[in-house]
């Protein structure tokens, strides 16, 4: 499979998996726009050209957000492995939270694990955090209090501490986006 072929196949697969979901903001954007933005950010603002990384960015929330049980999760993992290969599955798993754990535990684990991720996973996670900060600045979920937004910003900053040193453009962009968000919410 060519790089473009792989990326298109990932788009087809992820848009089907996320087809009924919307983002949290008031604009209720289709969920698939989020992984597309993460992939686009990596390529267009981060200068990344690795098709495995771009395809993993497109698939990055599929396991975390489109299964409801351990069995479904296992099934989806073997489907991704069969369609896209072990390497892409492994990278996707690196950035997937274990939803059987409490939310606070998962958030703490992201901070602790960031530094141990592969280089590709660090880039992907950095782009994911930038995209989320942009969304929160432009279109925060209705039910998020000011306090929750400010908390989210400091949490994202802590995770990104562990992701540094893999892509200077993305790193600068993260801090620029964080500063813009803080300006709006402080
Ligand atoms: Zn994401």
Image (cartoon, rainbow, N blue to C red):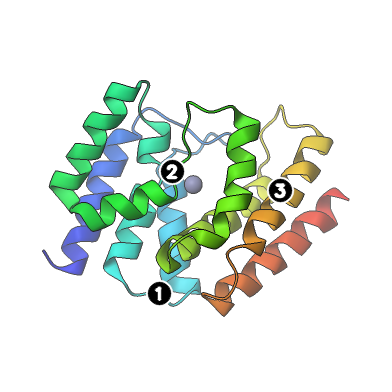
Between 8 and 26, the one lying in front of the other is: 8
- Relative placement, left or right, of 27 versus 157 is left
Which disc is residue 139 wearing?
A: none
| The N terminus, quarter of image | bottom left
Q: Is residue 167 left or right of residue 62?
A: right
Answer above or below: position of 85 versus 101: below
Element class at badge 2: loop
For the point 47% across and 60% down, the residue is 117
Q: CA distance from mark 2 to mark 1?
A: 21 Å
| Viewer-nearest of discs 2 and 1 | 2
3D distance between C-alphas at marks 3 and 2: 17 Å
Give the total of numbered labels: 3
Please identify the quarter of the rendering in which residue 14 is found. top left
Q: Which mark is residue 155?
A: 3
Q: Which residue is mark 1?
A: 48
Which x, y percent locates residue 149? 76, 41
Distance between the Cα atoms at labels 3 and 1? 26 Å
Specify few, some or many for label 2: CA neighbours under 10 Å numbering under 14, 14-19, or 20 or more: some
Residue 54: which quarter of the image? Answer: bottom left
Please name the residue shown 44% across and 39% down the image.
31
Point out the tag, 3 or 2, that comes first from the N-terminus: 2
* Relative image position of residue 56 (x, y in whole percent): 34, 55
Residue at 40% over, 74% down: 48
10 Å neighbourhood of mark 3: few (<14), some, or many (≥20)? some
Q: State the residue position of label 2.
A: 96
């Amino acid at each position: 499979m060519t790089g473009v072929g792989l990326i298109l196949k990932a788009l087809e697969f992820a848009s089907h998996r996320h087809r009924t979901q919307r983002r949290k903001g008031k604009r209720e954007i289709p969920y698939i726009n989020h992984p597309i933005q993460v992939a686009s950010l990596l390529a267009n603002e981060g200068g990344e050209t690795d098709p495995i990384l771009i395809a993993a960015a497109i698939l990055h929330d599929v396991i975390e957000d489109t299964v409801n049980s351990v069995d479904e999760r296992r099934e989806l993992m073997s489907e991704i492995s069969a369609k896209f290969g072990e390497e892409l599955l492994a990278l996707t798993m690196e950035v997937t939270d274990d939803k059987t754990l409490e939310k606070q535990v998962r958030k703490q684990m992201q901070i602790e694990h960031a530094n141990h991720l592969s280089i590709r996973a660090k880039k992907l996670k950095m782009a994911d955090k930038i995209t989320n900060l942009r969304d929160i600045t432009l279109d925060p979920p209705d039910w998020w209090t000011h306090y929750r937004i400010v908390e989210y910003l400091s949490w994202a900053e802590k995770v990104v501490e562990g992701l540094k040193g893999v892509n200077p453009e993305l790193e600068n962009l993260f801090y620029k986006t964080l500063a813009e968000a803080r300006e709006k919410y402080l």
